[in-house]
């Protein structure tokens, strides 16, 4: 059985593309049409359940205990090991706790890591929901294969996420307290204990449920500091489209400086092109010279920005529900266009969008000594951001029945 059943592109200039094809052919051939492998593929059906024998103290969401000693997690986690020799092992659901990896582990030296960020919502109808989780798990495959980690059928990871949520939600996200959420962090690391600079031969997938503290109700909106030429988040031929740890560590200095100067986030420019805001996608509504409102956001085509689930959902809802008021434009735009629109009074509003920070209104951008003020028509938000955020919220918490809400049936204790 040849691992090259999927024939990779042979162009000498497309090493990354052919590396991804090889990785998939070897580790998850079933997700392509024509593959089978001698290695075990990820199989959620084999999950071994090892319930915790020491449940963790419960705190009501919002309690300081959840945020004082790092990020607090629920009772269980799911782990699944992979080796190049035998493939994916049996996944396990077990007590949340420390991982054991060697000091030589690839991830600690070469940033062979990727992750996802999704949420579990306790609806006002008492049910648990994920929001478009199929998009997160397929993005996890794209991220993993970009950083030489093994592939898998995304539906198997979704099934593991489902299982962990179903197990821990009854205690940690009780139905008596709707409108509350947990943050789900699926992660893959190369725990290969080898210092050699090469593709890892050992990896670990794990999934944890946490209480992420996000402060997205910034009164008066977030102020963004446009990045300067000494820091670029992502570039053509890079990996800005993938949720790799390697994309975040190097941005923390700039983010820390921005915070120290009183800004909420960095507005990432590539040259003079506007890309994203912090770890969220950025949107601006401009009024054209003929009076048409246009929702503008950076395009996906050049692989620089992250294909956000929230971004996509904002665009979909705007196209479906606001088409009579708002023209949607996924296109390159430059900071100069924003500066000019501001001077001409044509900025209607701006916001950033992502799972962690949800829809956050932006009230200003500082760019090279100039403050660009951004209107907030409804006081603490613009009206488009408010509508979009409300629709998304209603879908997430089951106030509006929608295909994007993926119901998790919980385990009855
Ligand atoms: C995670 C992330 C986003 C938001 O993506 P969602 O799927 O909406 O959560 C946007 N930009 C970056 C850089 C991110 O890491």
Image: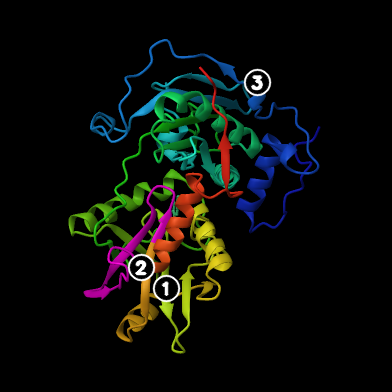
Q: Is residue 398 above or below residue 221?
A: above
Give the spatial CA distance, label 1 vs label 3.
48 Å
Q: Which residues are magenta?
A: 352-381
Question: Could you tell me which secondary element the residue under label 3 belongs to?
Answer: helix
Look at 22% across and 55% down and name the residue there: 259
Say whether marks 2 and 3 touch (CB < 8 Å).
Answer: no
- In the picture, the disc for residue 46 is 3
The residue sitting at 34% across, 53% down in the picture is: 251
The nearer-to-camera label among 1 and 3 is 1
Q: Residue furthest bottom?
A: 290
Q: CA distance from mark 1 to mark 2?
A: 9 Å
Cα distance in 3D space between marks 2 and 3 = 48 Å
The quadrant of the rendering that contains the N terminus is top right
Q: Hey, which quadrant is residue 30 in on the image?
A: top right
Task: Give the secondary structure at mark 2.
Answer: loop
Q: Give whichever of 260, 50 is nearer the camera.
A: 50
Give the mark toward the camera: 2 or 3: 2
Going from N to C along the chain, the mark reached first, 1 or 2, is 1
Q: In front: 150, or 161?
A: 161
Is 361 magenta? The answer is yes
Assess disc 1: are there few (<14), some (14-19) or many (≥20) residues with their C-alpha within 10 Å of its C-alpha. many
Q: Which residue is mark 1?
A: 285
Q: Is residue 234 visible?
A: no
Is 128 on the left-hand or right-hand side of 250?
A: right
Q: Residues within 10 Å of mark 3 (few under 14, many from 20)?
A: few
* Residue 322 image point, x, y percent: 52, 70
User: Going from the N terminus, do you reach mark 1 or mark 3 first?
Assistant: 3
Return the disc, 2 or 3, that comes first in the chain's sequence. Answer: 3
């Amino acid at each position: 059985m040849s691992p090259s059943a999927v024939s990779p592109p042979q162009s000498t200039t497309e090493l990354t593309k052919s590396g991804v094809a090889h990785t998939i052919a070897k580790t998850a051939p079933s997700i392509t049409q024509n593959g089978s492998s001698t290695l075990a593929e990820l199989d959620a059906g084999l999950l071994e359940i090892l319930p915790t024998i020491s449940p963790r103290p419960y705190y009501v969401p919002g309690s300081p205990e959840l945020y004082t000693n790092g990020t607090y997690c629920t009772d269980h986690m799911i782990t699944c090991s992979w080796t190049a020799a035998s493939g994916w092992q049996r996944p396990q659901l077990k007590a949340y706790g420390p991982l054991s990896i060697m000091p030589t582990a690839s991830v600690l030296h070469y940033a062979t890591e990727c992750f996802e960020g999704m949420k579990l919502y306790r609806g006002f109808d008492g049910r648990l929901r994920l929001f478009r989780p199929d998009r997160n798990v397929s993005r996890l495959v794209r991220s993993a294969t970009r950083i030489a980690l093994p592939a898998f059928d995304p539906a198997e990871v979704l099934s593991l996420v489902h299982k962990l949520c179903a197990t821990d939600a009854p205690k940690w996200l009780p139905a008596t307290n709707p409108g509350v959420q947990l943050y789900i962090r699926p992660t893959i690391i190369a725990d290969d204990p080898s210092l050699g600079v090469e593709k890892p031969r050992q990896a670990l997938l794990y999934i944890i449920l946490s209480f992420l503290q996000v402060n997205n109700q910034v009164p008066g909106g977030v102020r963004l500091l446009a990045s300067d030429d000494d820091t670029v988040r992502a570039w053509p031929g890079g990996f800005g489209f993938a949720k790799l740890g390697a994309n975040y560590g190097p941005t923390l200095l700039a983010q820390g400086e921005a915070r120290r100067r009183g800004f909420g986030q960095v507005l990432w420019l590539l040259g003079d092109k506007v890309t994203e805001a912090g770890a969220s996608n950025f949107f601006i509504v401009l009024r054209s010279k003929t009076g048409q409102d246009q929702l503008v956001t950076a395009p996906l085509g050049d692989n620089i920005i992250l294909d956000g689930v929230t971004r996509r959902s904002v665009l979909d809802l705007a196209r479906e529900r606001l088409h009579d008021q708002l023209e949607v434009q996924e296109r390159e735009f430059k900071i100069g266009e924003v500066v000019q629109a501001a001077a001409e009074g044509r900025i209607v509003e701006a916001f950033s969008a992502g799972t962690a920070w949800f829809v956050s209104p932006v009230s200003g951008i500082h760019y090279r000594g100039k403050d660009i003020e951004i209107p907030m028509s409804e006081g603490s938000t613009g009206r488009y951001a408010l509508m979009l955020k409300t629709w998304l919220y209603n879908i997430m918490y089951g106030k509006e029945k929608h295909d994007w809400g993926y119901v998790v049936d919980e385990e009855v204790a």
